Structure formats: structure tokens, C-alpha cells
Amino acid sequence: MKKLIGLLATGSICMFAACSSGEDDPITPPNSWNNGGSNTQVTAETCQQAGKVLSVDPVTSTLYCADPALSSPGMQTGFSSSSADPYGGTGITPQAGITPTTQASSSSLSIVPPATSSSSVPSSPASSPATQTPKSSPGTQTPPADESDGKWHLALWDGTAGAPQVPTGNKTGGYWYSYTDSGDKGKSVLVWDATDDGTSADGLVPVITECQGLCGSFDLIVGANPYKPYVGVGFNYSKSANEVADATSSRGVCVTYTSTIDIILEMGLGSQDSKIGYANPFVTLPASASPKTVDFGWADFEQPDWASAAQTVTNPQQALASLKFKFAGTKDSTDGGSGSFKIMKVGAPSECN
């Protein structure tokens, strides 16, 4: 019997794997199970000592020690081929109830698992731990633009994307618009530095796409305006210019821009504006010929010096309706000259960097 098993190891096996020139040299295949649980070579003798018989898988040419009662090649190998490879290995996954041992190394032999039909491929986990995306904690998660929770959550708007809507946490808000001092009988003019004039059905989309931001030029003409001449651009946090909500979570605002004159960045407070005599809290973005990024916290916004005690507001970010970028003259009832600007990014502090 021992001689017959030896012939099996050195004769029949040559059809599936390279044989050694020495008749007594054992074959140590890579990519095999060591049923003895040690690093000994798989030979007829080691199998016999374990009360098993030397066998070979006809598909993978792998030698192994099998129970004499097992006759199915699929049962003998202990492997199934899978293209999914949810375990992060070589594309071979162990079947249930079999514990793999360390793969034997070999510099001369390599066995590539053959393709199998889809019926033999085991089902894979929905996703492996290595590819799962961790979820944000509820305390830090920001609702997307198409969801509203009654608060404002300012996120980054980048003009290079061509979108006309600043993410504000309200699906109807954030759309850019422009305005002039015509309501105060002024004659100031804002002209877009783009082929489209911003009045098409697409609104400012063609302007933003061509400029990769909002870019324009202005001429500050006082006309019959008793105040400083001005033009500006801005966005409401919601569809309505009078809808206010708490914007505390955004912590403030960042802007990347260029401008030939200082920009007055105002907080619009909806119907509260007229009640405080338009003494709106603001910060100043200094003129800059090259792209400049600035960050402001809500506490940096202050009302003008001329505001009276009756016009004072506290925590205006808790009842915020809009943000407005105003280009204005420096003296009442006096023309303010010409200039140009480009707004490239707007977001919460540090997002523009």
C-alpha cells in the first residue's frame, strides 16, 4: 500500500504539477492547506501518519491530506474561487468550517485559482470594514442643500463649479442677485464682465460659468441719492429676503475675492433693517488687486458708528436673512468713481483656504 501511494505522489500527480527529478523528493505546493496544522511537507507518509490519504485537487493541482471517505474534489480542496474577495486576500476565500494555515512560500511554483461558474461563488459581505465610509456624528453633520431644519448652515460656494446657489441649509435659498441704488434715486450702474448680462432665463449662471465666480465693473453715480452711491451683490439664506433664522452654527464667513475698492459685507436682517434705520452690522474687505482670502467670525460684524442706542442689535447672527457685498462711495451726495470686482469663494470660516 505504501508503495502504491508513493506511485500516486510521483506518477499521477505529474499531470498537474511539476515533478522533482528525485523519486523520493517530496512536493510542497504553495497555496495549500496543511491539514496536520504544522509546517511539515505534504507527502504520503505525513498523511498516513495522520490517518489520512494523500490526494490532489484536479483544478488547482494542490496536494493535501484528505479523509478516505471524501471523494468530491470541491470538498477536498477546502477552497472556492471568488472574484469579489471580501477578505482582502488573493481572491481565494475559505469555506465555512475550515481554518486556513499560513501559506507556504515558493520561488518556483505559483498557482492561480481558476475561474468558476457564478453558482460556486459564495456571497460576499455587503461591504468590507476597509471600504466602509464612517458616518458623521449627529452633532457635526450639516444638512445638504435640499434639506432644511429651520437654521442656516453656510457651506462652501466655489465659483469654479458654476453653481448659482450658495449652500445655506435651505433648499430654496442661496441664489446670487445684484442690486443698485436706484431705489434711493441713484444712477449707479453694475455691468457684468461676461458675454451674458445676467438677465437671461438662466440668471447669473452664464456669468458665473464664464468668470468662474462673480465678476463685474461698476460706476458709482449719485444722481438724486442723498446718501453714498452704491451697487452690490448678495444672496438670501432662503427664498424670501425677510425670512430670518439662526446662523450661529456657521461661526461666520470666509470670502476669496479681488476688488479695486473696499467691499462692505453687510448682514441683512430682513424686516429688522428698516427698524434699525439700516444700521446693519458689517465688516470691511480691503481692496486687493490679487486674490485675497479673509475669515470673519460673527462677533467681527459691528454696526456703524452713527447707529443710536435705539438702533442697537445683539447677536444678529441669530436672526439673519442675507449677506450683501456692497461697493459704495465714500461721501454722501457725491459720485464714487468706477471700479471692478470678482468674488470667487464664499463659505464658513477656513473653508475658502
Image (cartoon, rainbow, N blue to C red):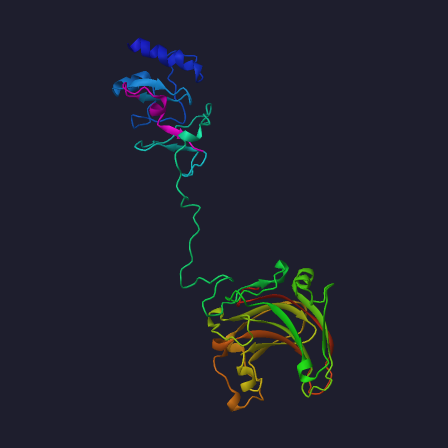
Quadrant for residue 23, please give it.
top left
Where's residue 99, x and y in %?
31, 32
110 left or right of 38?
Answer: right
Where's residue 230, x and y in %?
68, 79
Residue drawn at 42 percent across, 53 percent down? 134
Where's residue 98, x and y in %?
31, 31
The magenta segment is 66-82
Quadrant for residue 224, please give it.
bottom right
Q: Eyeballing the image, is 170 above or below 67? A: below
Q: Eyeballing the image, is 29 above or below 203? A: above
Residue drawn at 54 percent across, 90 percent down? 308
Quadrant for residue 113, please give it.
top left
250 left or right of 331?
Answer: left
Q: How many marks?
A: 0
Q: Eyeballing the image, is 80 above or below 315? A: above
Residue drawn at 49 percent across, 72 percent down? 247
Residue 68 drawn in magenta = yes
Which image quarter is the N terminus in? top left
Which image quarter is the C terminus in? bottom right
Residue 150 drawn in magenta = no
Q: State whether residue 26 appears in this view.
A: yes
Q: State whether residue 353 appears in this view.
A: no
Residue drawn at 41 percent across, 39 percent down? 86
